[in-house]
Image (spheres, rainbow, N blue to C red):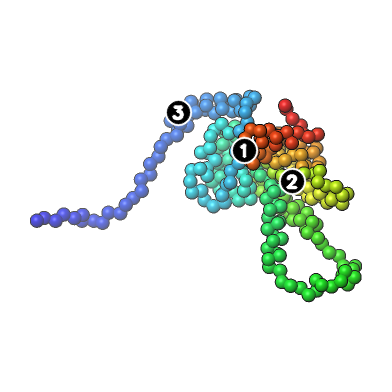
Amino acid sequence: MMQFSCSDWTDPESLNIHVPSIEEQNPELYAQYLKSLNDFKTLDHQVVIVSVNNVSTATTSRSQHLTDMPDSLDYICLNNIQEVNQATISEMNDVRKKGTRVLGLVDFDAIESAWKKILEEEVANATPNPESDKTENEGEGEETVDDATCFIEYCKSEVGRQIAASNTLEVDGIVVNYTGFDLNSLVEENEITAEIARQGAFFDAVANWRVLNANKDLIFKGFPQNVINKSLFSDCKYIIVNAHSAKNEYEMSYLVFMALVKDIPTVL
């Protein structure tokens, strides 16, 4: 019987396999492709806008890369505008070569949801306070700050952070997301005044951004009929009606019809 063995220990090594891209194989042909692609996007066509829940950590799959998305996309919106990793930042210029514009999301709904969570946590962590049983007369003359006023200041701060992050990334525009509620439910004058202030905390910052970024694209997403000051819509490149809840074409048509109110521009 004879035994055989390796004289040296063999360590596994990863192979660096490089698959040349079309650009590397035929640069001239790829340049012609890019020109045709960019020319197509300047023509009248069905616009495609994609939103991406980008991650702040290192990418773990090809689906998280902007360069792996279809070349036909007109816009890619980064939903987590304050948490953009270096890979995404470096790929923004790559997709721009294909005529794809990168947008940042400025999200009122996310700000409102975060505020509600803060209030819920405060209630959950609150301890009984005997002082709260004092009569109104004992507290008379003391200035109190209600939740509505606190939200306005919170909203101004958060929308400012979102816009600042978009400016830092030098995106090609922003998507403004706002759902709101039916304005017909506002009856009392104080309710209307309060809602004007609440919306102003968000949309005033957007309007200021627009003045300083006239060369960039502004897109609205949500329910435009619930916005009090509709002058913003004349500056919007597109208005996206939020129809995620629609289960068929009739529900889709209903949501679009409800958005067709006075002072909202259309191309119908």
Q: Nearer the viewer, residue 102 or 72?
A: 72
The furthest residue to the left: 1
Q: Which mark is residue 247?
A: 1
Image x and y of residue 6, in percent: 21, 54
**Image height of 148 relative to 17, above or below:** below
- Badge 1 crowding class, 10 Å Cα cut-off, few under 14, some 14 to 19, many 20 or more, is few
Amino acid type assigned to the residue bearing label 1 in the image:
Lys
Q: Nearer the viewer, residue 254 or 8?
A: 254
The reply, left or right, for residue 230 in relation to residue 168 is right
The reply, left or right, for residue 138 in relation to residue 99 is right
In the picture of the structure, the residue carrying the numbered disc 3 is 26
Q: Nearer the viewer, residue 22 or 194?
A: 194
Mark nearer the viewer, 3 or 2 = 2
- Badge 2 crowding class, 10 Å Cα cut-off, few under 14, some 14 to 19, many 20 or more, is some
Image x and y of residue 39, in percent: 60, 25
In the picture of the structure, the residue carrying the numbered disc 2 is 180
